[in-house]
Amino acid sequence: KLDSEIKSWLAFAAQKVVEVNALAKALAGQKDEAYFAANTAAQASRRSSPRVTNEEVQKAAAALRGSDHRRATNVSARLDAQQKKLNLPVLPTTTIGSFPQTVELRRVRREYKAKKISEDEYVSAIKEEISKVVKIQ
């Protein structure tokens, strides 16, 4: 359901295999001109798209000075402020990536795929699981 313009800018696993294959053929002297022309067009589309080119952002970035990249406070002052506000343990941790799917979540997915539950029931169960995970974090 991705917008076709945005989709043309992306490459997922299947597209990556096609890309590597096209590069290998090109190195062997069998360049697929149409493939590379389409790739060039997609890159040009992304560079010129108002979805990724914002004049205000470009002006703000151009106006940055070296001092804008330095913090006003030193590390220990920021750590003290964070500790006062967040009361973190000595070795705070977070979860990076996805939480494992629970038995319940797998059941709900199976039932939805088998059309045993409605889309609303499925979405509700997913949202409930997300809520539990957010509370854990």
Image: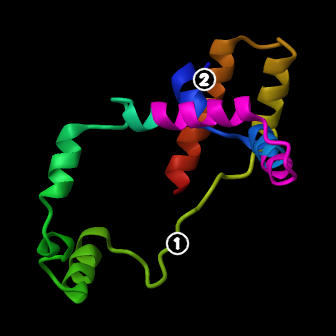
Say if the magenta span includes residue 24. yes
Q: How many marks?
A: 2
**Residue lying at 60% horizontally and 23% vertically, measured from the top left:** 124
Q: Which residue is mark 2?
A: 124
Q: Which residues are magenta?
A: 23-45
- Prevailing SS of the magenta stretch: helix
Tell me the element at label 1: loop
Displayed quadrant of residue 67: bottom left
Displayed quadrant of residue 125: top right
Instruction: Name the residue at the front extreme.
Output: 29
Position of residue 34 relative to residue 31, above or below, is above
Say if the magenta span includes residue 104. no
**Residue lying at 17% horizontally and 56% vertically, measured from the top left:** 62
Position of residue 125 relative to residue 1, above or below, is below
Q: Position of residue 84 (x, y in %)?
A: 23, 76
Dot 2, crowdedness within 10 Å: few (<14), some or many (≥20)?
Answer: few
Mark 1 belongs to which amino acid? Thr
Q: Which residue is mark 1?
A: 93
Say if mark 2 contacts mark 1, CB within 8 Å.
Answer: no
**Residue lying at 18% horizontally and 76% vertically, measured from the top left:** 71
Q: Position of residue 99 (x, y in %)?
A: 67, 52
Mark 2 belongs to which amino acid? Ser
Closer-to-camera residue (67/74): 67
**Residue lying at 16% horizontally and 74% vertically, measured from the top left:** 66
Q: Position of residue 18 (x, y in %)?
A: 80, 40
Q: CA distance from mark 2 to mark 1?
A: 29 Å
Tell me the element at label 2: helix
